[in-house]
Image (cartoon, rainbow, N blue to C red):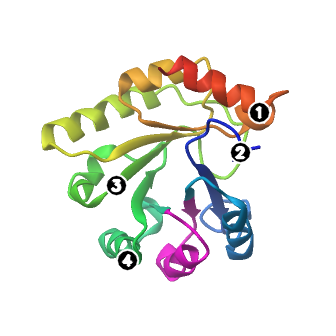
Amino acid sequence: MINRSEADLIHVDVMDGRFVPNISLGLPVCAAIARHATKPLDVHLMMIEPEKYIREFRKAGADRITIHIEACANLHSGIMLIKETGALAGVAVNPHTPVELLVDILPDLDTVLLMSVNPGFGGQQFIGRTYSKVKRLAEMRESAGLDFTIGIDGGVSLSNAPALVAAGADVLIAGSFIFNAPSPEQAISELKKTTG
């Protein structure tokens, strides 16, 4: 379904049961997805000490690897390790974390993923303060002359997608909205139409 849809990438959430309360997909599942995927694999590591697994997820097929600012003792070295593997490098930011903390690492990033729910569970309510956070990050990007993408993860739907894009978001990660729809392919198509 995803390979045939208008989706631009496949977002793979990896949860360790420590950084977030849930446990989800690991290396073997990521590798299995990669064997059948025709779209880039966007691997989101919601785990403590993600640097221990970056090389292995790249070998398993990750095209883009995103780690959390809140989970890394040395964020810069984690980003450099991702880049060293040849993957695109991203940082995820939880709802309570100010985007201003990223100012010194932004030039090294390919993407920033703003969590618009608390990570760990699907189907949560979108946090409305995300709009102002997207705007602040987009202003930081413009004022520094950078070109990293801004992604939104959590509670994305037809009702908030246009405003998120208008605020400066480039990538919308939708889970429940897509997989709970009668036709996931149609849901993806409608979401893309609302964002131009």
Q: Which residue is mark 3?
A: 110
Task: Tell me the kind of residue under disc 2.
Answer: Ile
| Relative image position of residue 78 (x, y in whole percent) | 38, 73
Q: CA distance from mark 3 to mark 4?
A: 13 Å
Spatial distance from mark 2 to mark 4, Cα to Cα?
A: 29 Å
Residue 49 shows in this picture: no
Marks 2 and 4: CB-CB under 8 Å? no
Cβ atoms at labels 2 and 1 below 8 Å apart: yes
| Residue at position x 39%, y 20% in the image | 166
Q: Which residue is mark 4?
A: 81
- Give me the residue at 77% from left, 33% from top: 184
Q: Name the residue beneath numbered marker 2.
A: 2
Q: Quadrant of the N terminus?
A: top right
Numbered marks: total: 4
The percent position of residue 112, horizontal first and vertical second, equals 39, 49
Magenta stretch holds residue 45:
yes
Q: Is residue 134 left or right of residue 31?
A: left
- Say if mark 3 contacts mark 2, CB within 8 Å: no
Whichever of labels 1 and 4 marks the residue nearer the N terminus, that label is: 4
**Toward the viewer: 112 or 8?**
8
Q: Which residues are magenta?
A: 43-63
Which residue is situated farthest in the right direction here? Answer: 182
Q: How far is mark 2 from mark 1, CA to CA?
A: 8 Å
What is the crowding at mark 4: few (fewer than 14 residues within 10 Å), some, or many (at least 20)? some
Residue behind mark 1: 184
Magenta segment: does it hold 31? Answer: no
**Residue 147 image offset from top left, x and y in percent:** 26, 45
Across and down, in percent, residue 9 comes to 57, 48
Looking at numbered disc 3 in the image, what kind of residue is underneath it? Asp
Please report the residue visible at 64 percent of the width from the left and 63 percent of the height from the top. Answer: 14
| 109 versus 160 height, above or below | below
Q: Amino acid at mark 4?
A: Leu
